[in-house]
Amino acid sequence: MTVDRESEGHRILISAPFGRDADSIAKLLRAEGYEAIICPDIVAIAGRIDETVGAILLTEEALARDVAILKAALVAQPSWSDVPFVLLAAQRFGRTPNEHLSKLALFDLASNSVVLERPLGKASLFSAIASAMRLREKQFQMRDRLVDLDESETRLRLATTTGGIGIWDFDPLTGRLEWDERCKTMFGLPVDADITYDGSFLAGLHPDDRERSDQAVRAALQPGGTGSVEIEYRTVGITDGVERWIAAKGGSVFSDGRPIRFIGTVTDISQRKGTEKALAESEAALRLERQALDDLNRTLEERVARRTVELEEEMAARTRAEEALRQAQKMEAVGQLTGGIAHDFNNMLTGIIGGINLAKRRIASGNVADVDRFMDAATEAAHRAAALIARLLAFSRRQTLDAKPMEVRLQLEATRELLERTLPESIIVDTRVDGDVGSVVADANQLESALLNLAINARDAMPDGGKLTIGASRETVEAHNDLRLQPGPYVVLHVLDTGVGMPPEVLEKVFEPFFTTKPIGQGTGLGLSMIYGFAQQSGGTVSIRSKPGQGTLIRLYLPAAEGKAAIEQVELADSVPEGRGQTVLVVEDDEAVRLLVCEVLSDLRYHAIEAGDADVAIPLLSGMRTIDLMVSDVGLPGMNGRQLAEIARQHRPTLPILFVTGYAENAATKAGFLGTNMDMISKPFAVEALAAKISEMMPRR
């Protein structure tokens, strides 16, 4: 039965068959805001136990019969569920045993219970109920964490399966050894074979590698050592007799100075070893042939020519072998990376499982004081696991972001005009902007590029035409959200098309770098991954929803700006103050760009000095000639623009410097790249913008 998350654990089931106890207790609890349900007997209680129940309140008279039915209902709960009980017992004098409560304990029903002796005050009742409801809430939190953990384990298993990597898990205390299907295959064993250290691992090793491998394992289990193993050995299939080369990597988990777990991965490197052997044999043969060639009579041109042809063929074979080796090494690197991830992930699993087990033991014993501490430890380990997956899936973009507040409505109006000129007439472009959307903090150029990329993808998905809707709304994201965003206000830009849509197997890969469904040469597969990287770098994220035949919806989350954004006015060229013959040094290796900058300077009545690279510019900077401003490209050949600026400041400490760049590998943000009295303008730029920037930076006399 599906239960609404908001109704989980809200009900309190009450069974007090004698007198008006049930009505009185229910009235008190309802007055405190609880949803109290009165049940006539234990059978009714058992029939209503589900995820809506937060606690069960019983009087001892209710336990007079049908306890086995209640036990069966509790046993049928999921493993994470342990409904708390509040038991109201009659007042006892002396050490007279309570028959009903003894019966409850006999059936293990009171492991998570509080016994209150009647008569009791409201404060005691409310305190016991509140404590029980908190424990129930933690059980739901534990369930959600287990679901997240199961999804993470599924992704890890998928990664190891794709890479052909086997996983082993050894318990040094009990001697239990577990291998997955791929690990058993590498030792020539069937999937259902029983595994032991001596009978499977040692028995399956090549005799020449057995002692060395056994010593490596024992060394990794020694306290005070490295705790890790990385070794290559040969196996001889126990049932198939096939010899294989295996690379193993793993490590030990210690507790109180003793190894409690030894885990790791194995990868079949037989192909790589075969390639290495072939390469070695080829090199040996090549050396022999070269020696023989030196001994040949140099006057026998025909023989030399024939041998030269043979050597060229051998060199080609060697090149192919080297390429095969590099490919095998790549696969080995993937295996080593996954082995490290498996080791870290199992450490995190130890923290999660250990914390949950300790919490359950404390709850079972009635000592709930330390439950929060153990649950927090499990939560922290789970968060580290989520961060690890996140790092594996992250894709970083190197781009200079100039994030500023901007009016969303104005930006979308400008984007719509661009799209109407770009897209075919068969596609209708519609914009829908909420009235309270306000402003967003982002780089305007990168945002426009992202929307254009999404529109082009939508165009390709609608070859026969359709409708493209671009909208914007304002949303407040709460803490602990599914999008993993920081809580706060966000502007959500959504792009909806009526195209062909995507199946699930394509949808799950769309943000991966270099993934594309277009034919070779018609797409790089970087469009959506670039948008994802831009959103992440801007403090937001991207989500996508699509079904075949139903179009695609992409939602781009970006941080909202407080208040209204200042509207930047771009002045016309004739409004820019003209110069008075000041001298500007232009350092640009691209002749066309250099010509453009110099023409702008000439129109503004400045005197321009041209330099194609730093080698030409440095003598001018170190000379006596007056220079009022330097305009330099960042990506110059040889010495780059930032390095040239440092040398310029050695000769002219107050010289203003304007950088012009289309891509800056070391300039992720302008603030971290620029120094005092420096500024930057990105290519491509408007002439008016360049003129305004030059006028702004030109020192006044």
Image (cartoon, rainbow, N blue to C red):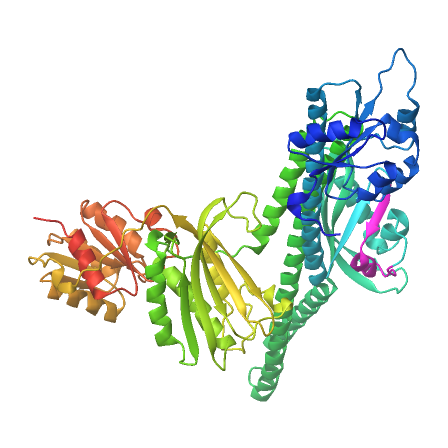
| Quadrant hosting residue 160 | bottom right
Instruction: Judge from the rendering whether residue 98 lies leftward or rightward of residue 324; answer left or right.
Output: right
Q: Residue drawn at (33%, 46%), measured in percent from left and top?
A: 563
Estimate the x, y position of residue 672 in percent, counting from the top left: 35, 47
In this figure, what is the number of numbered marks?
A: 0
Residue at 68%, 52% in the rendered image = 151
Compared across the picture, whether 358 is left or right of 589 comes to right
How far across and how far down the image is residue 486, in percent?
50, 45
Q: Could you tell me if residue 512 is visible in this image? A: no
- Residue segment shown in magenta: 175-191
Residue 596 in view here: yes
Residue 572 lies in magenta, yes or no?
no
Give 153 or 448, whichever is nearer the viewer.
448
Q: Is residue 649 left or right of residue 114?
A: left
Q: Is residue 190 magenta?
A: yes
Q: Is residue 153 left or right of residue 205?
A: left
Give the percent coordinates (x, y) of residue 53.
Answer: 74, 39
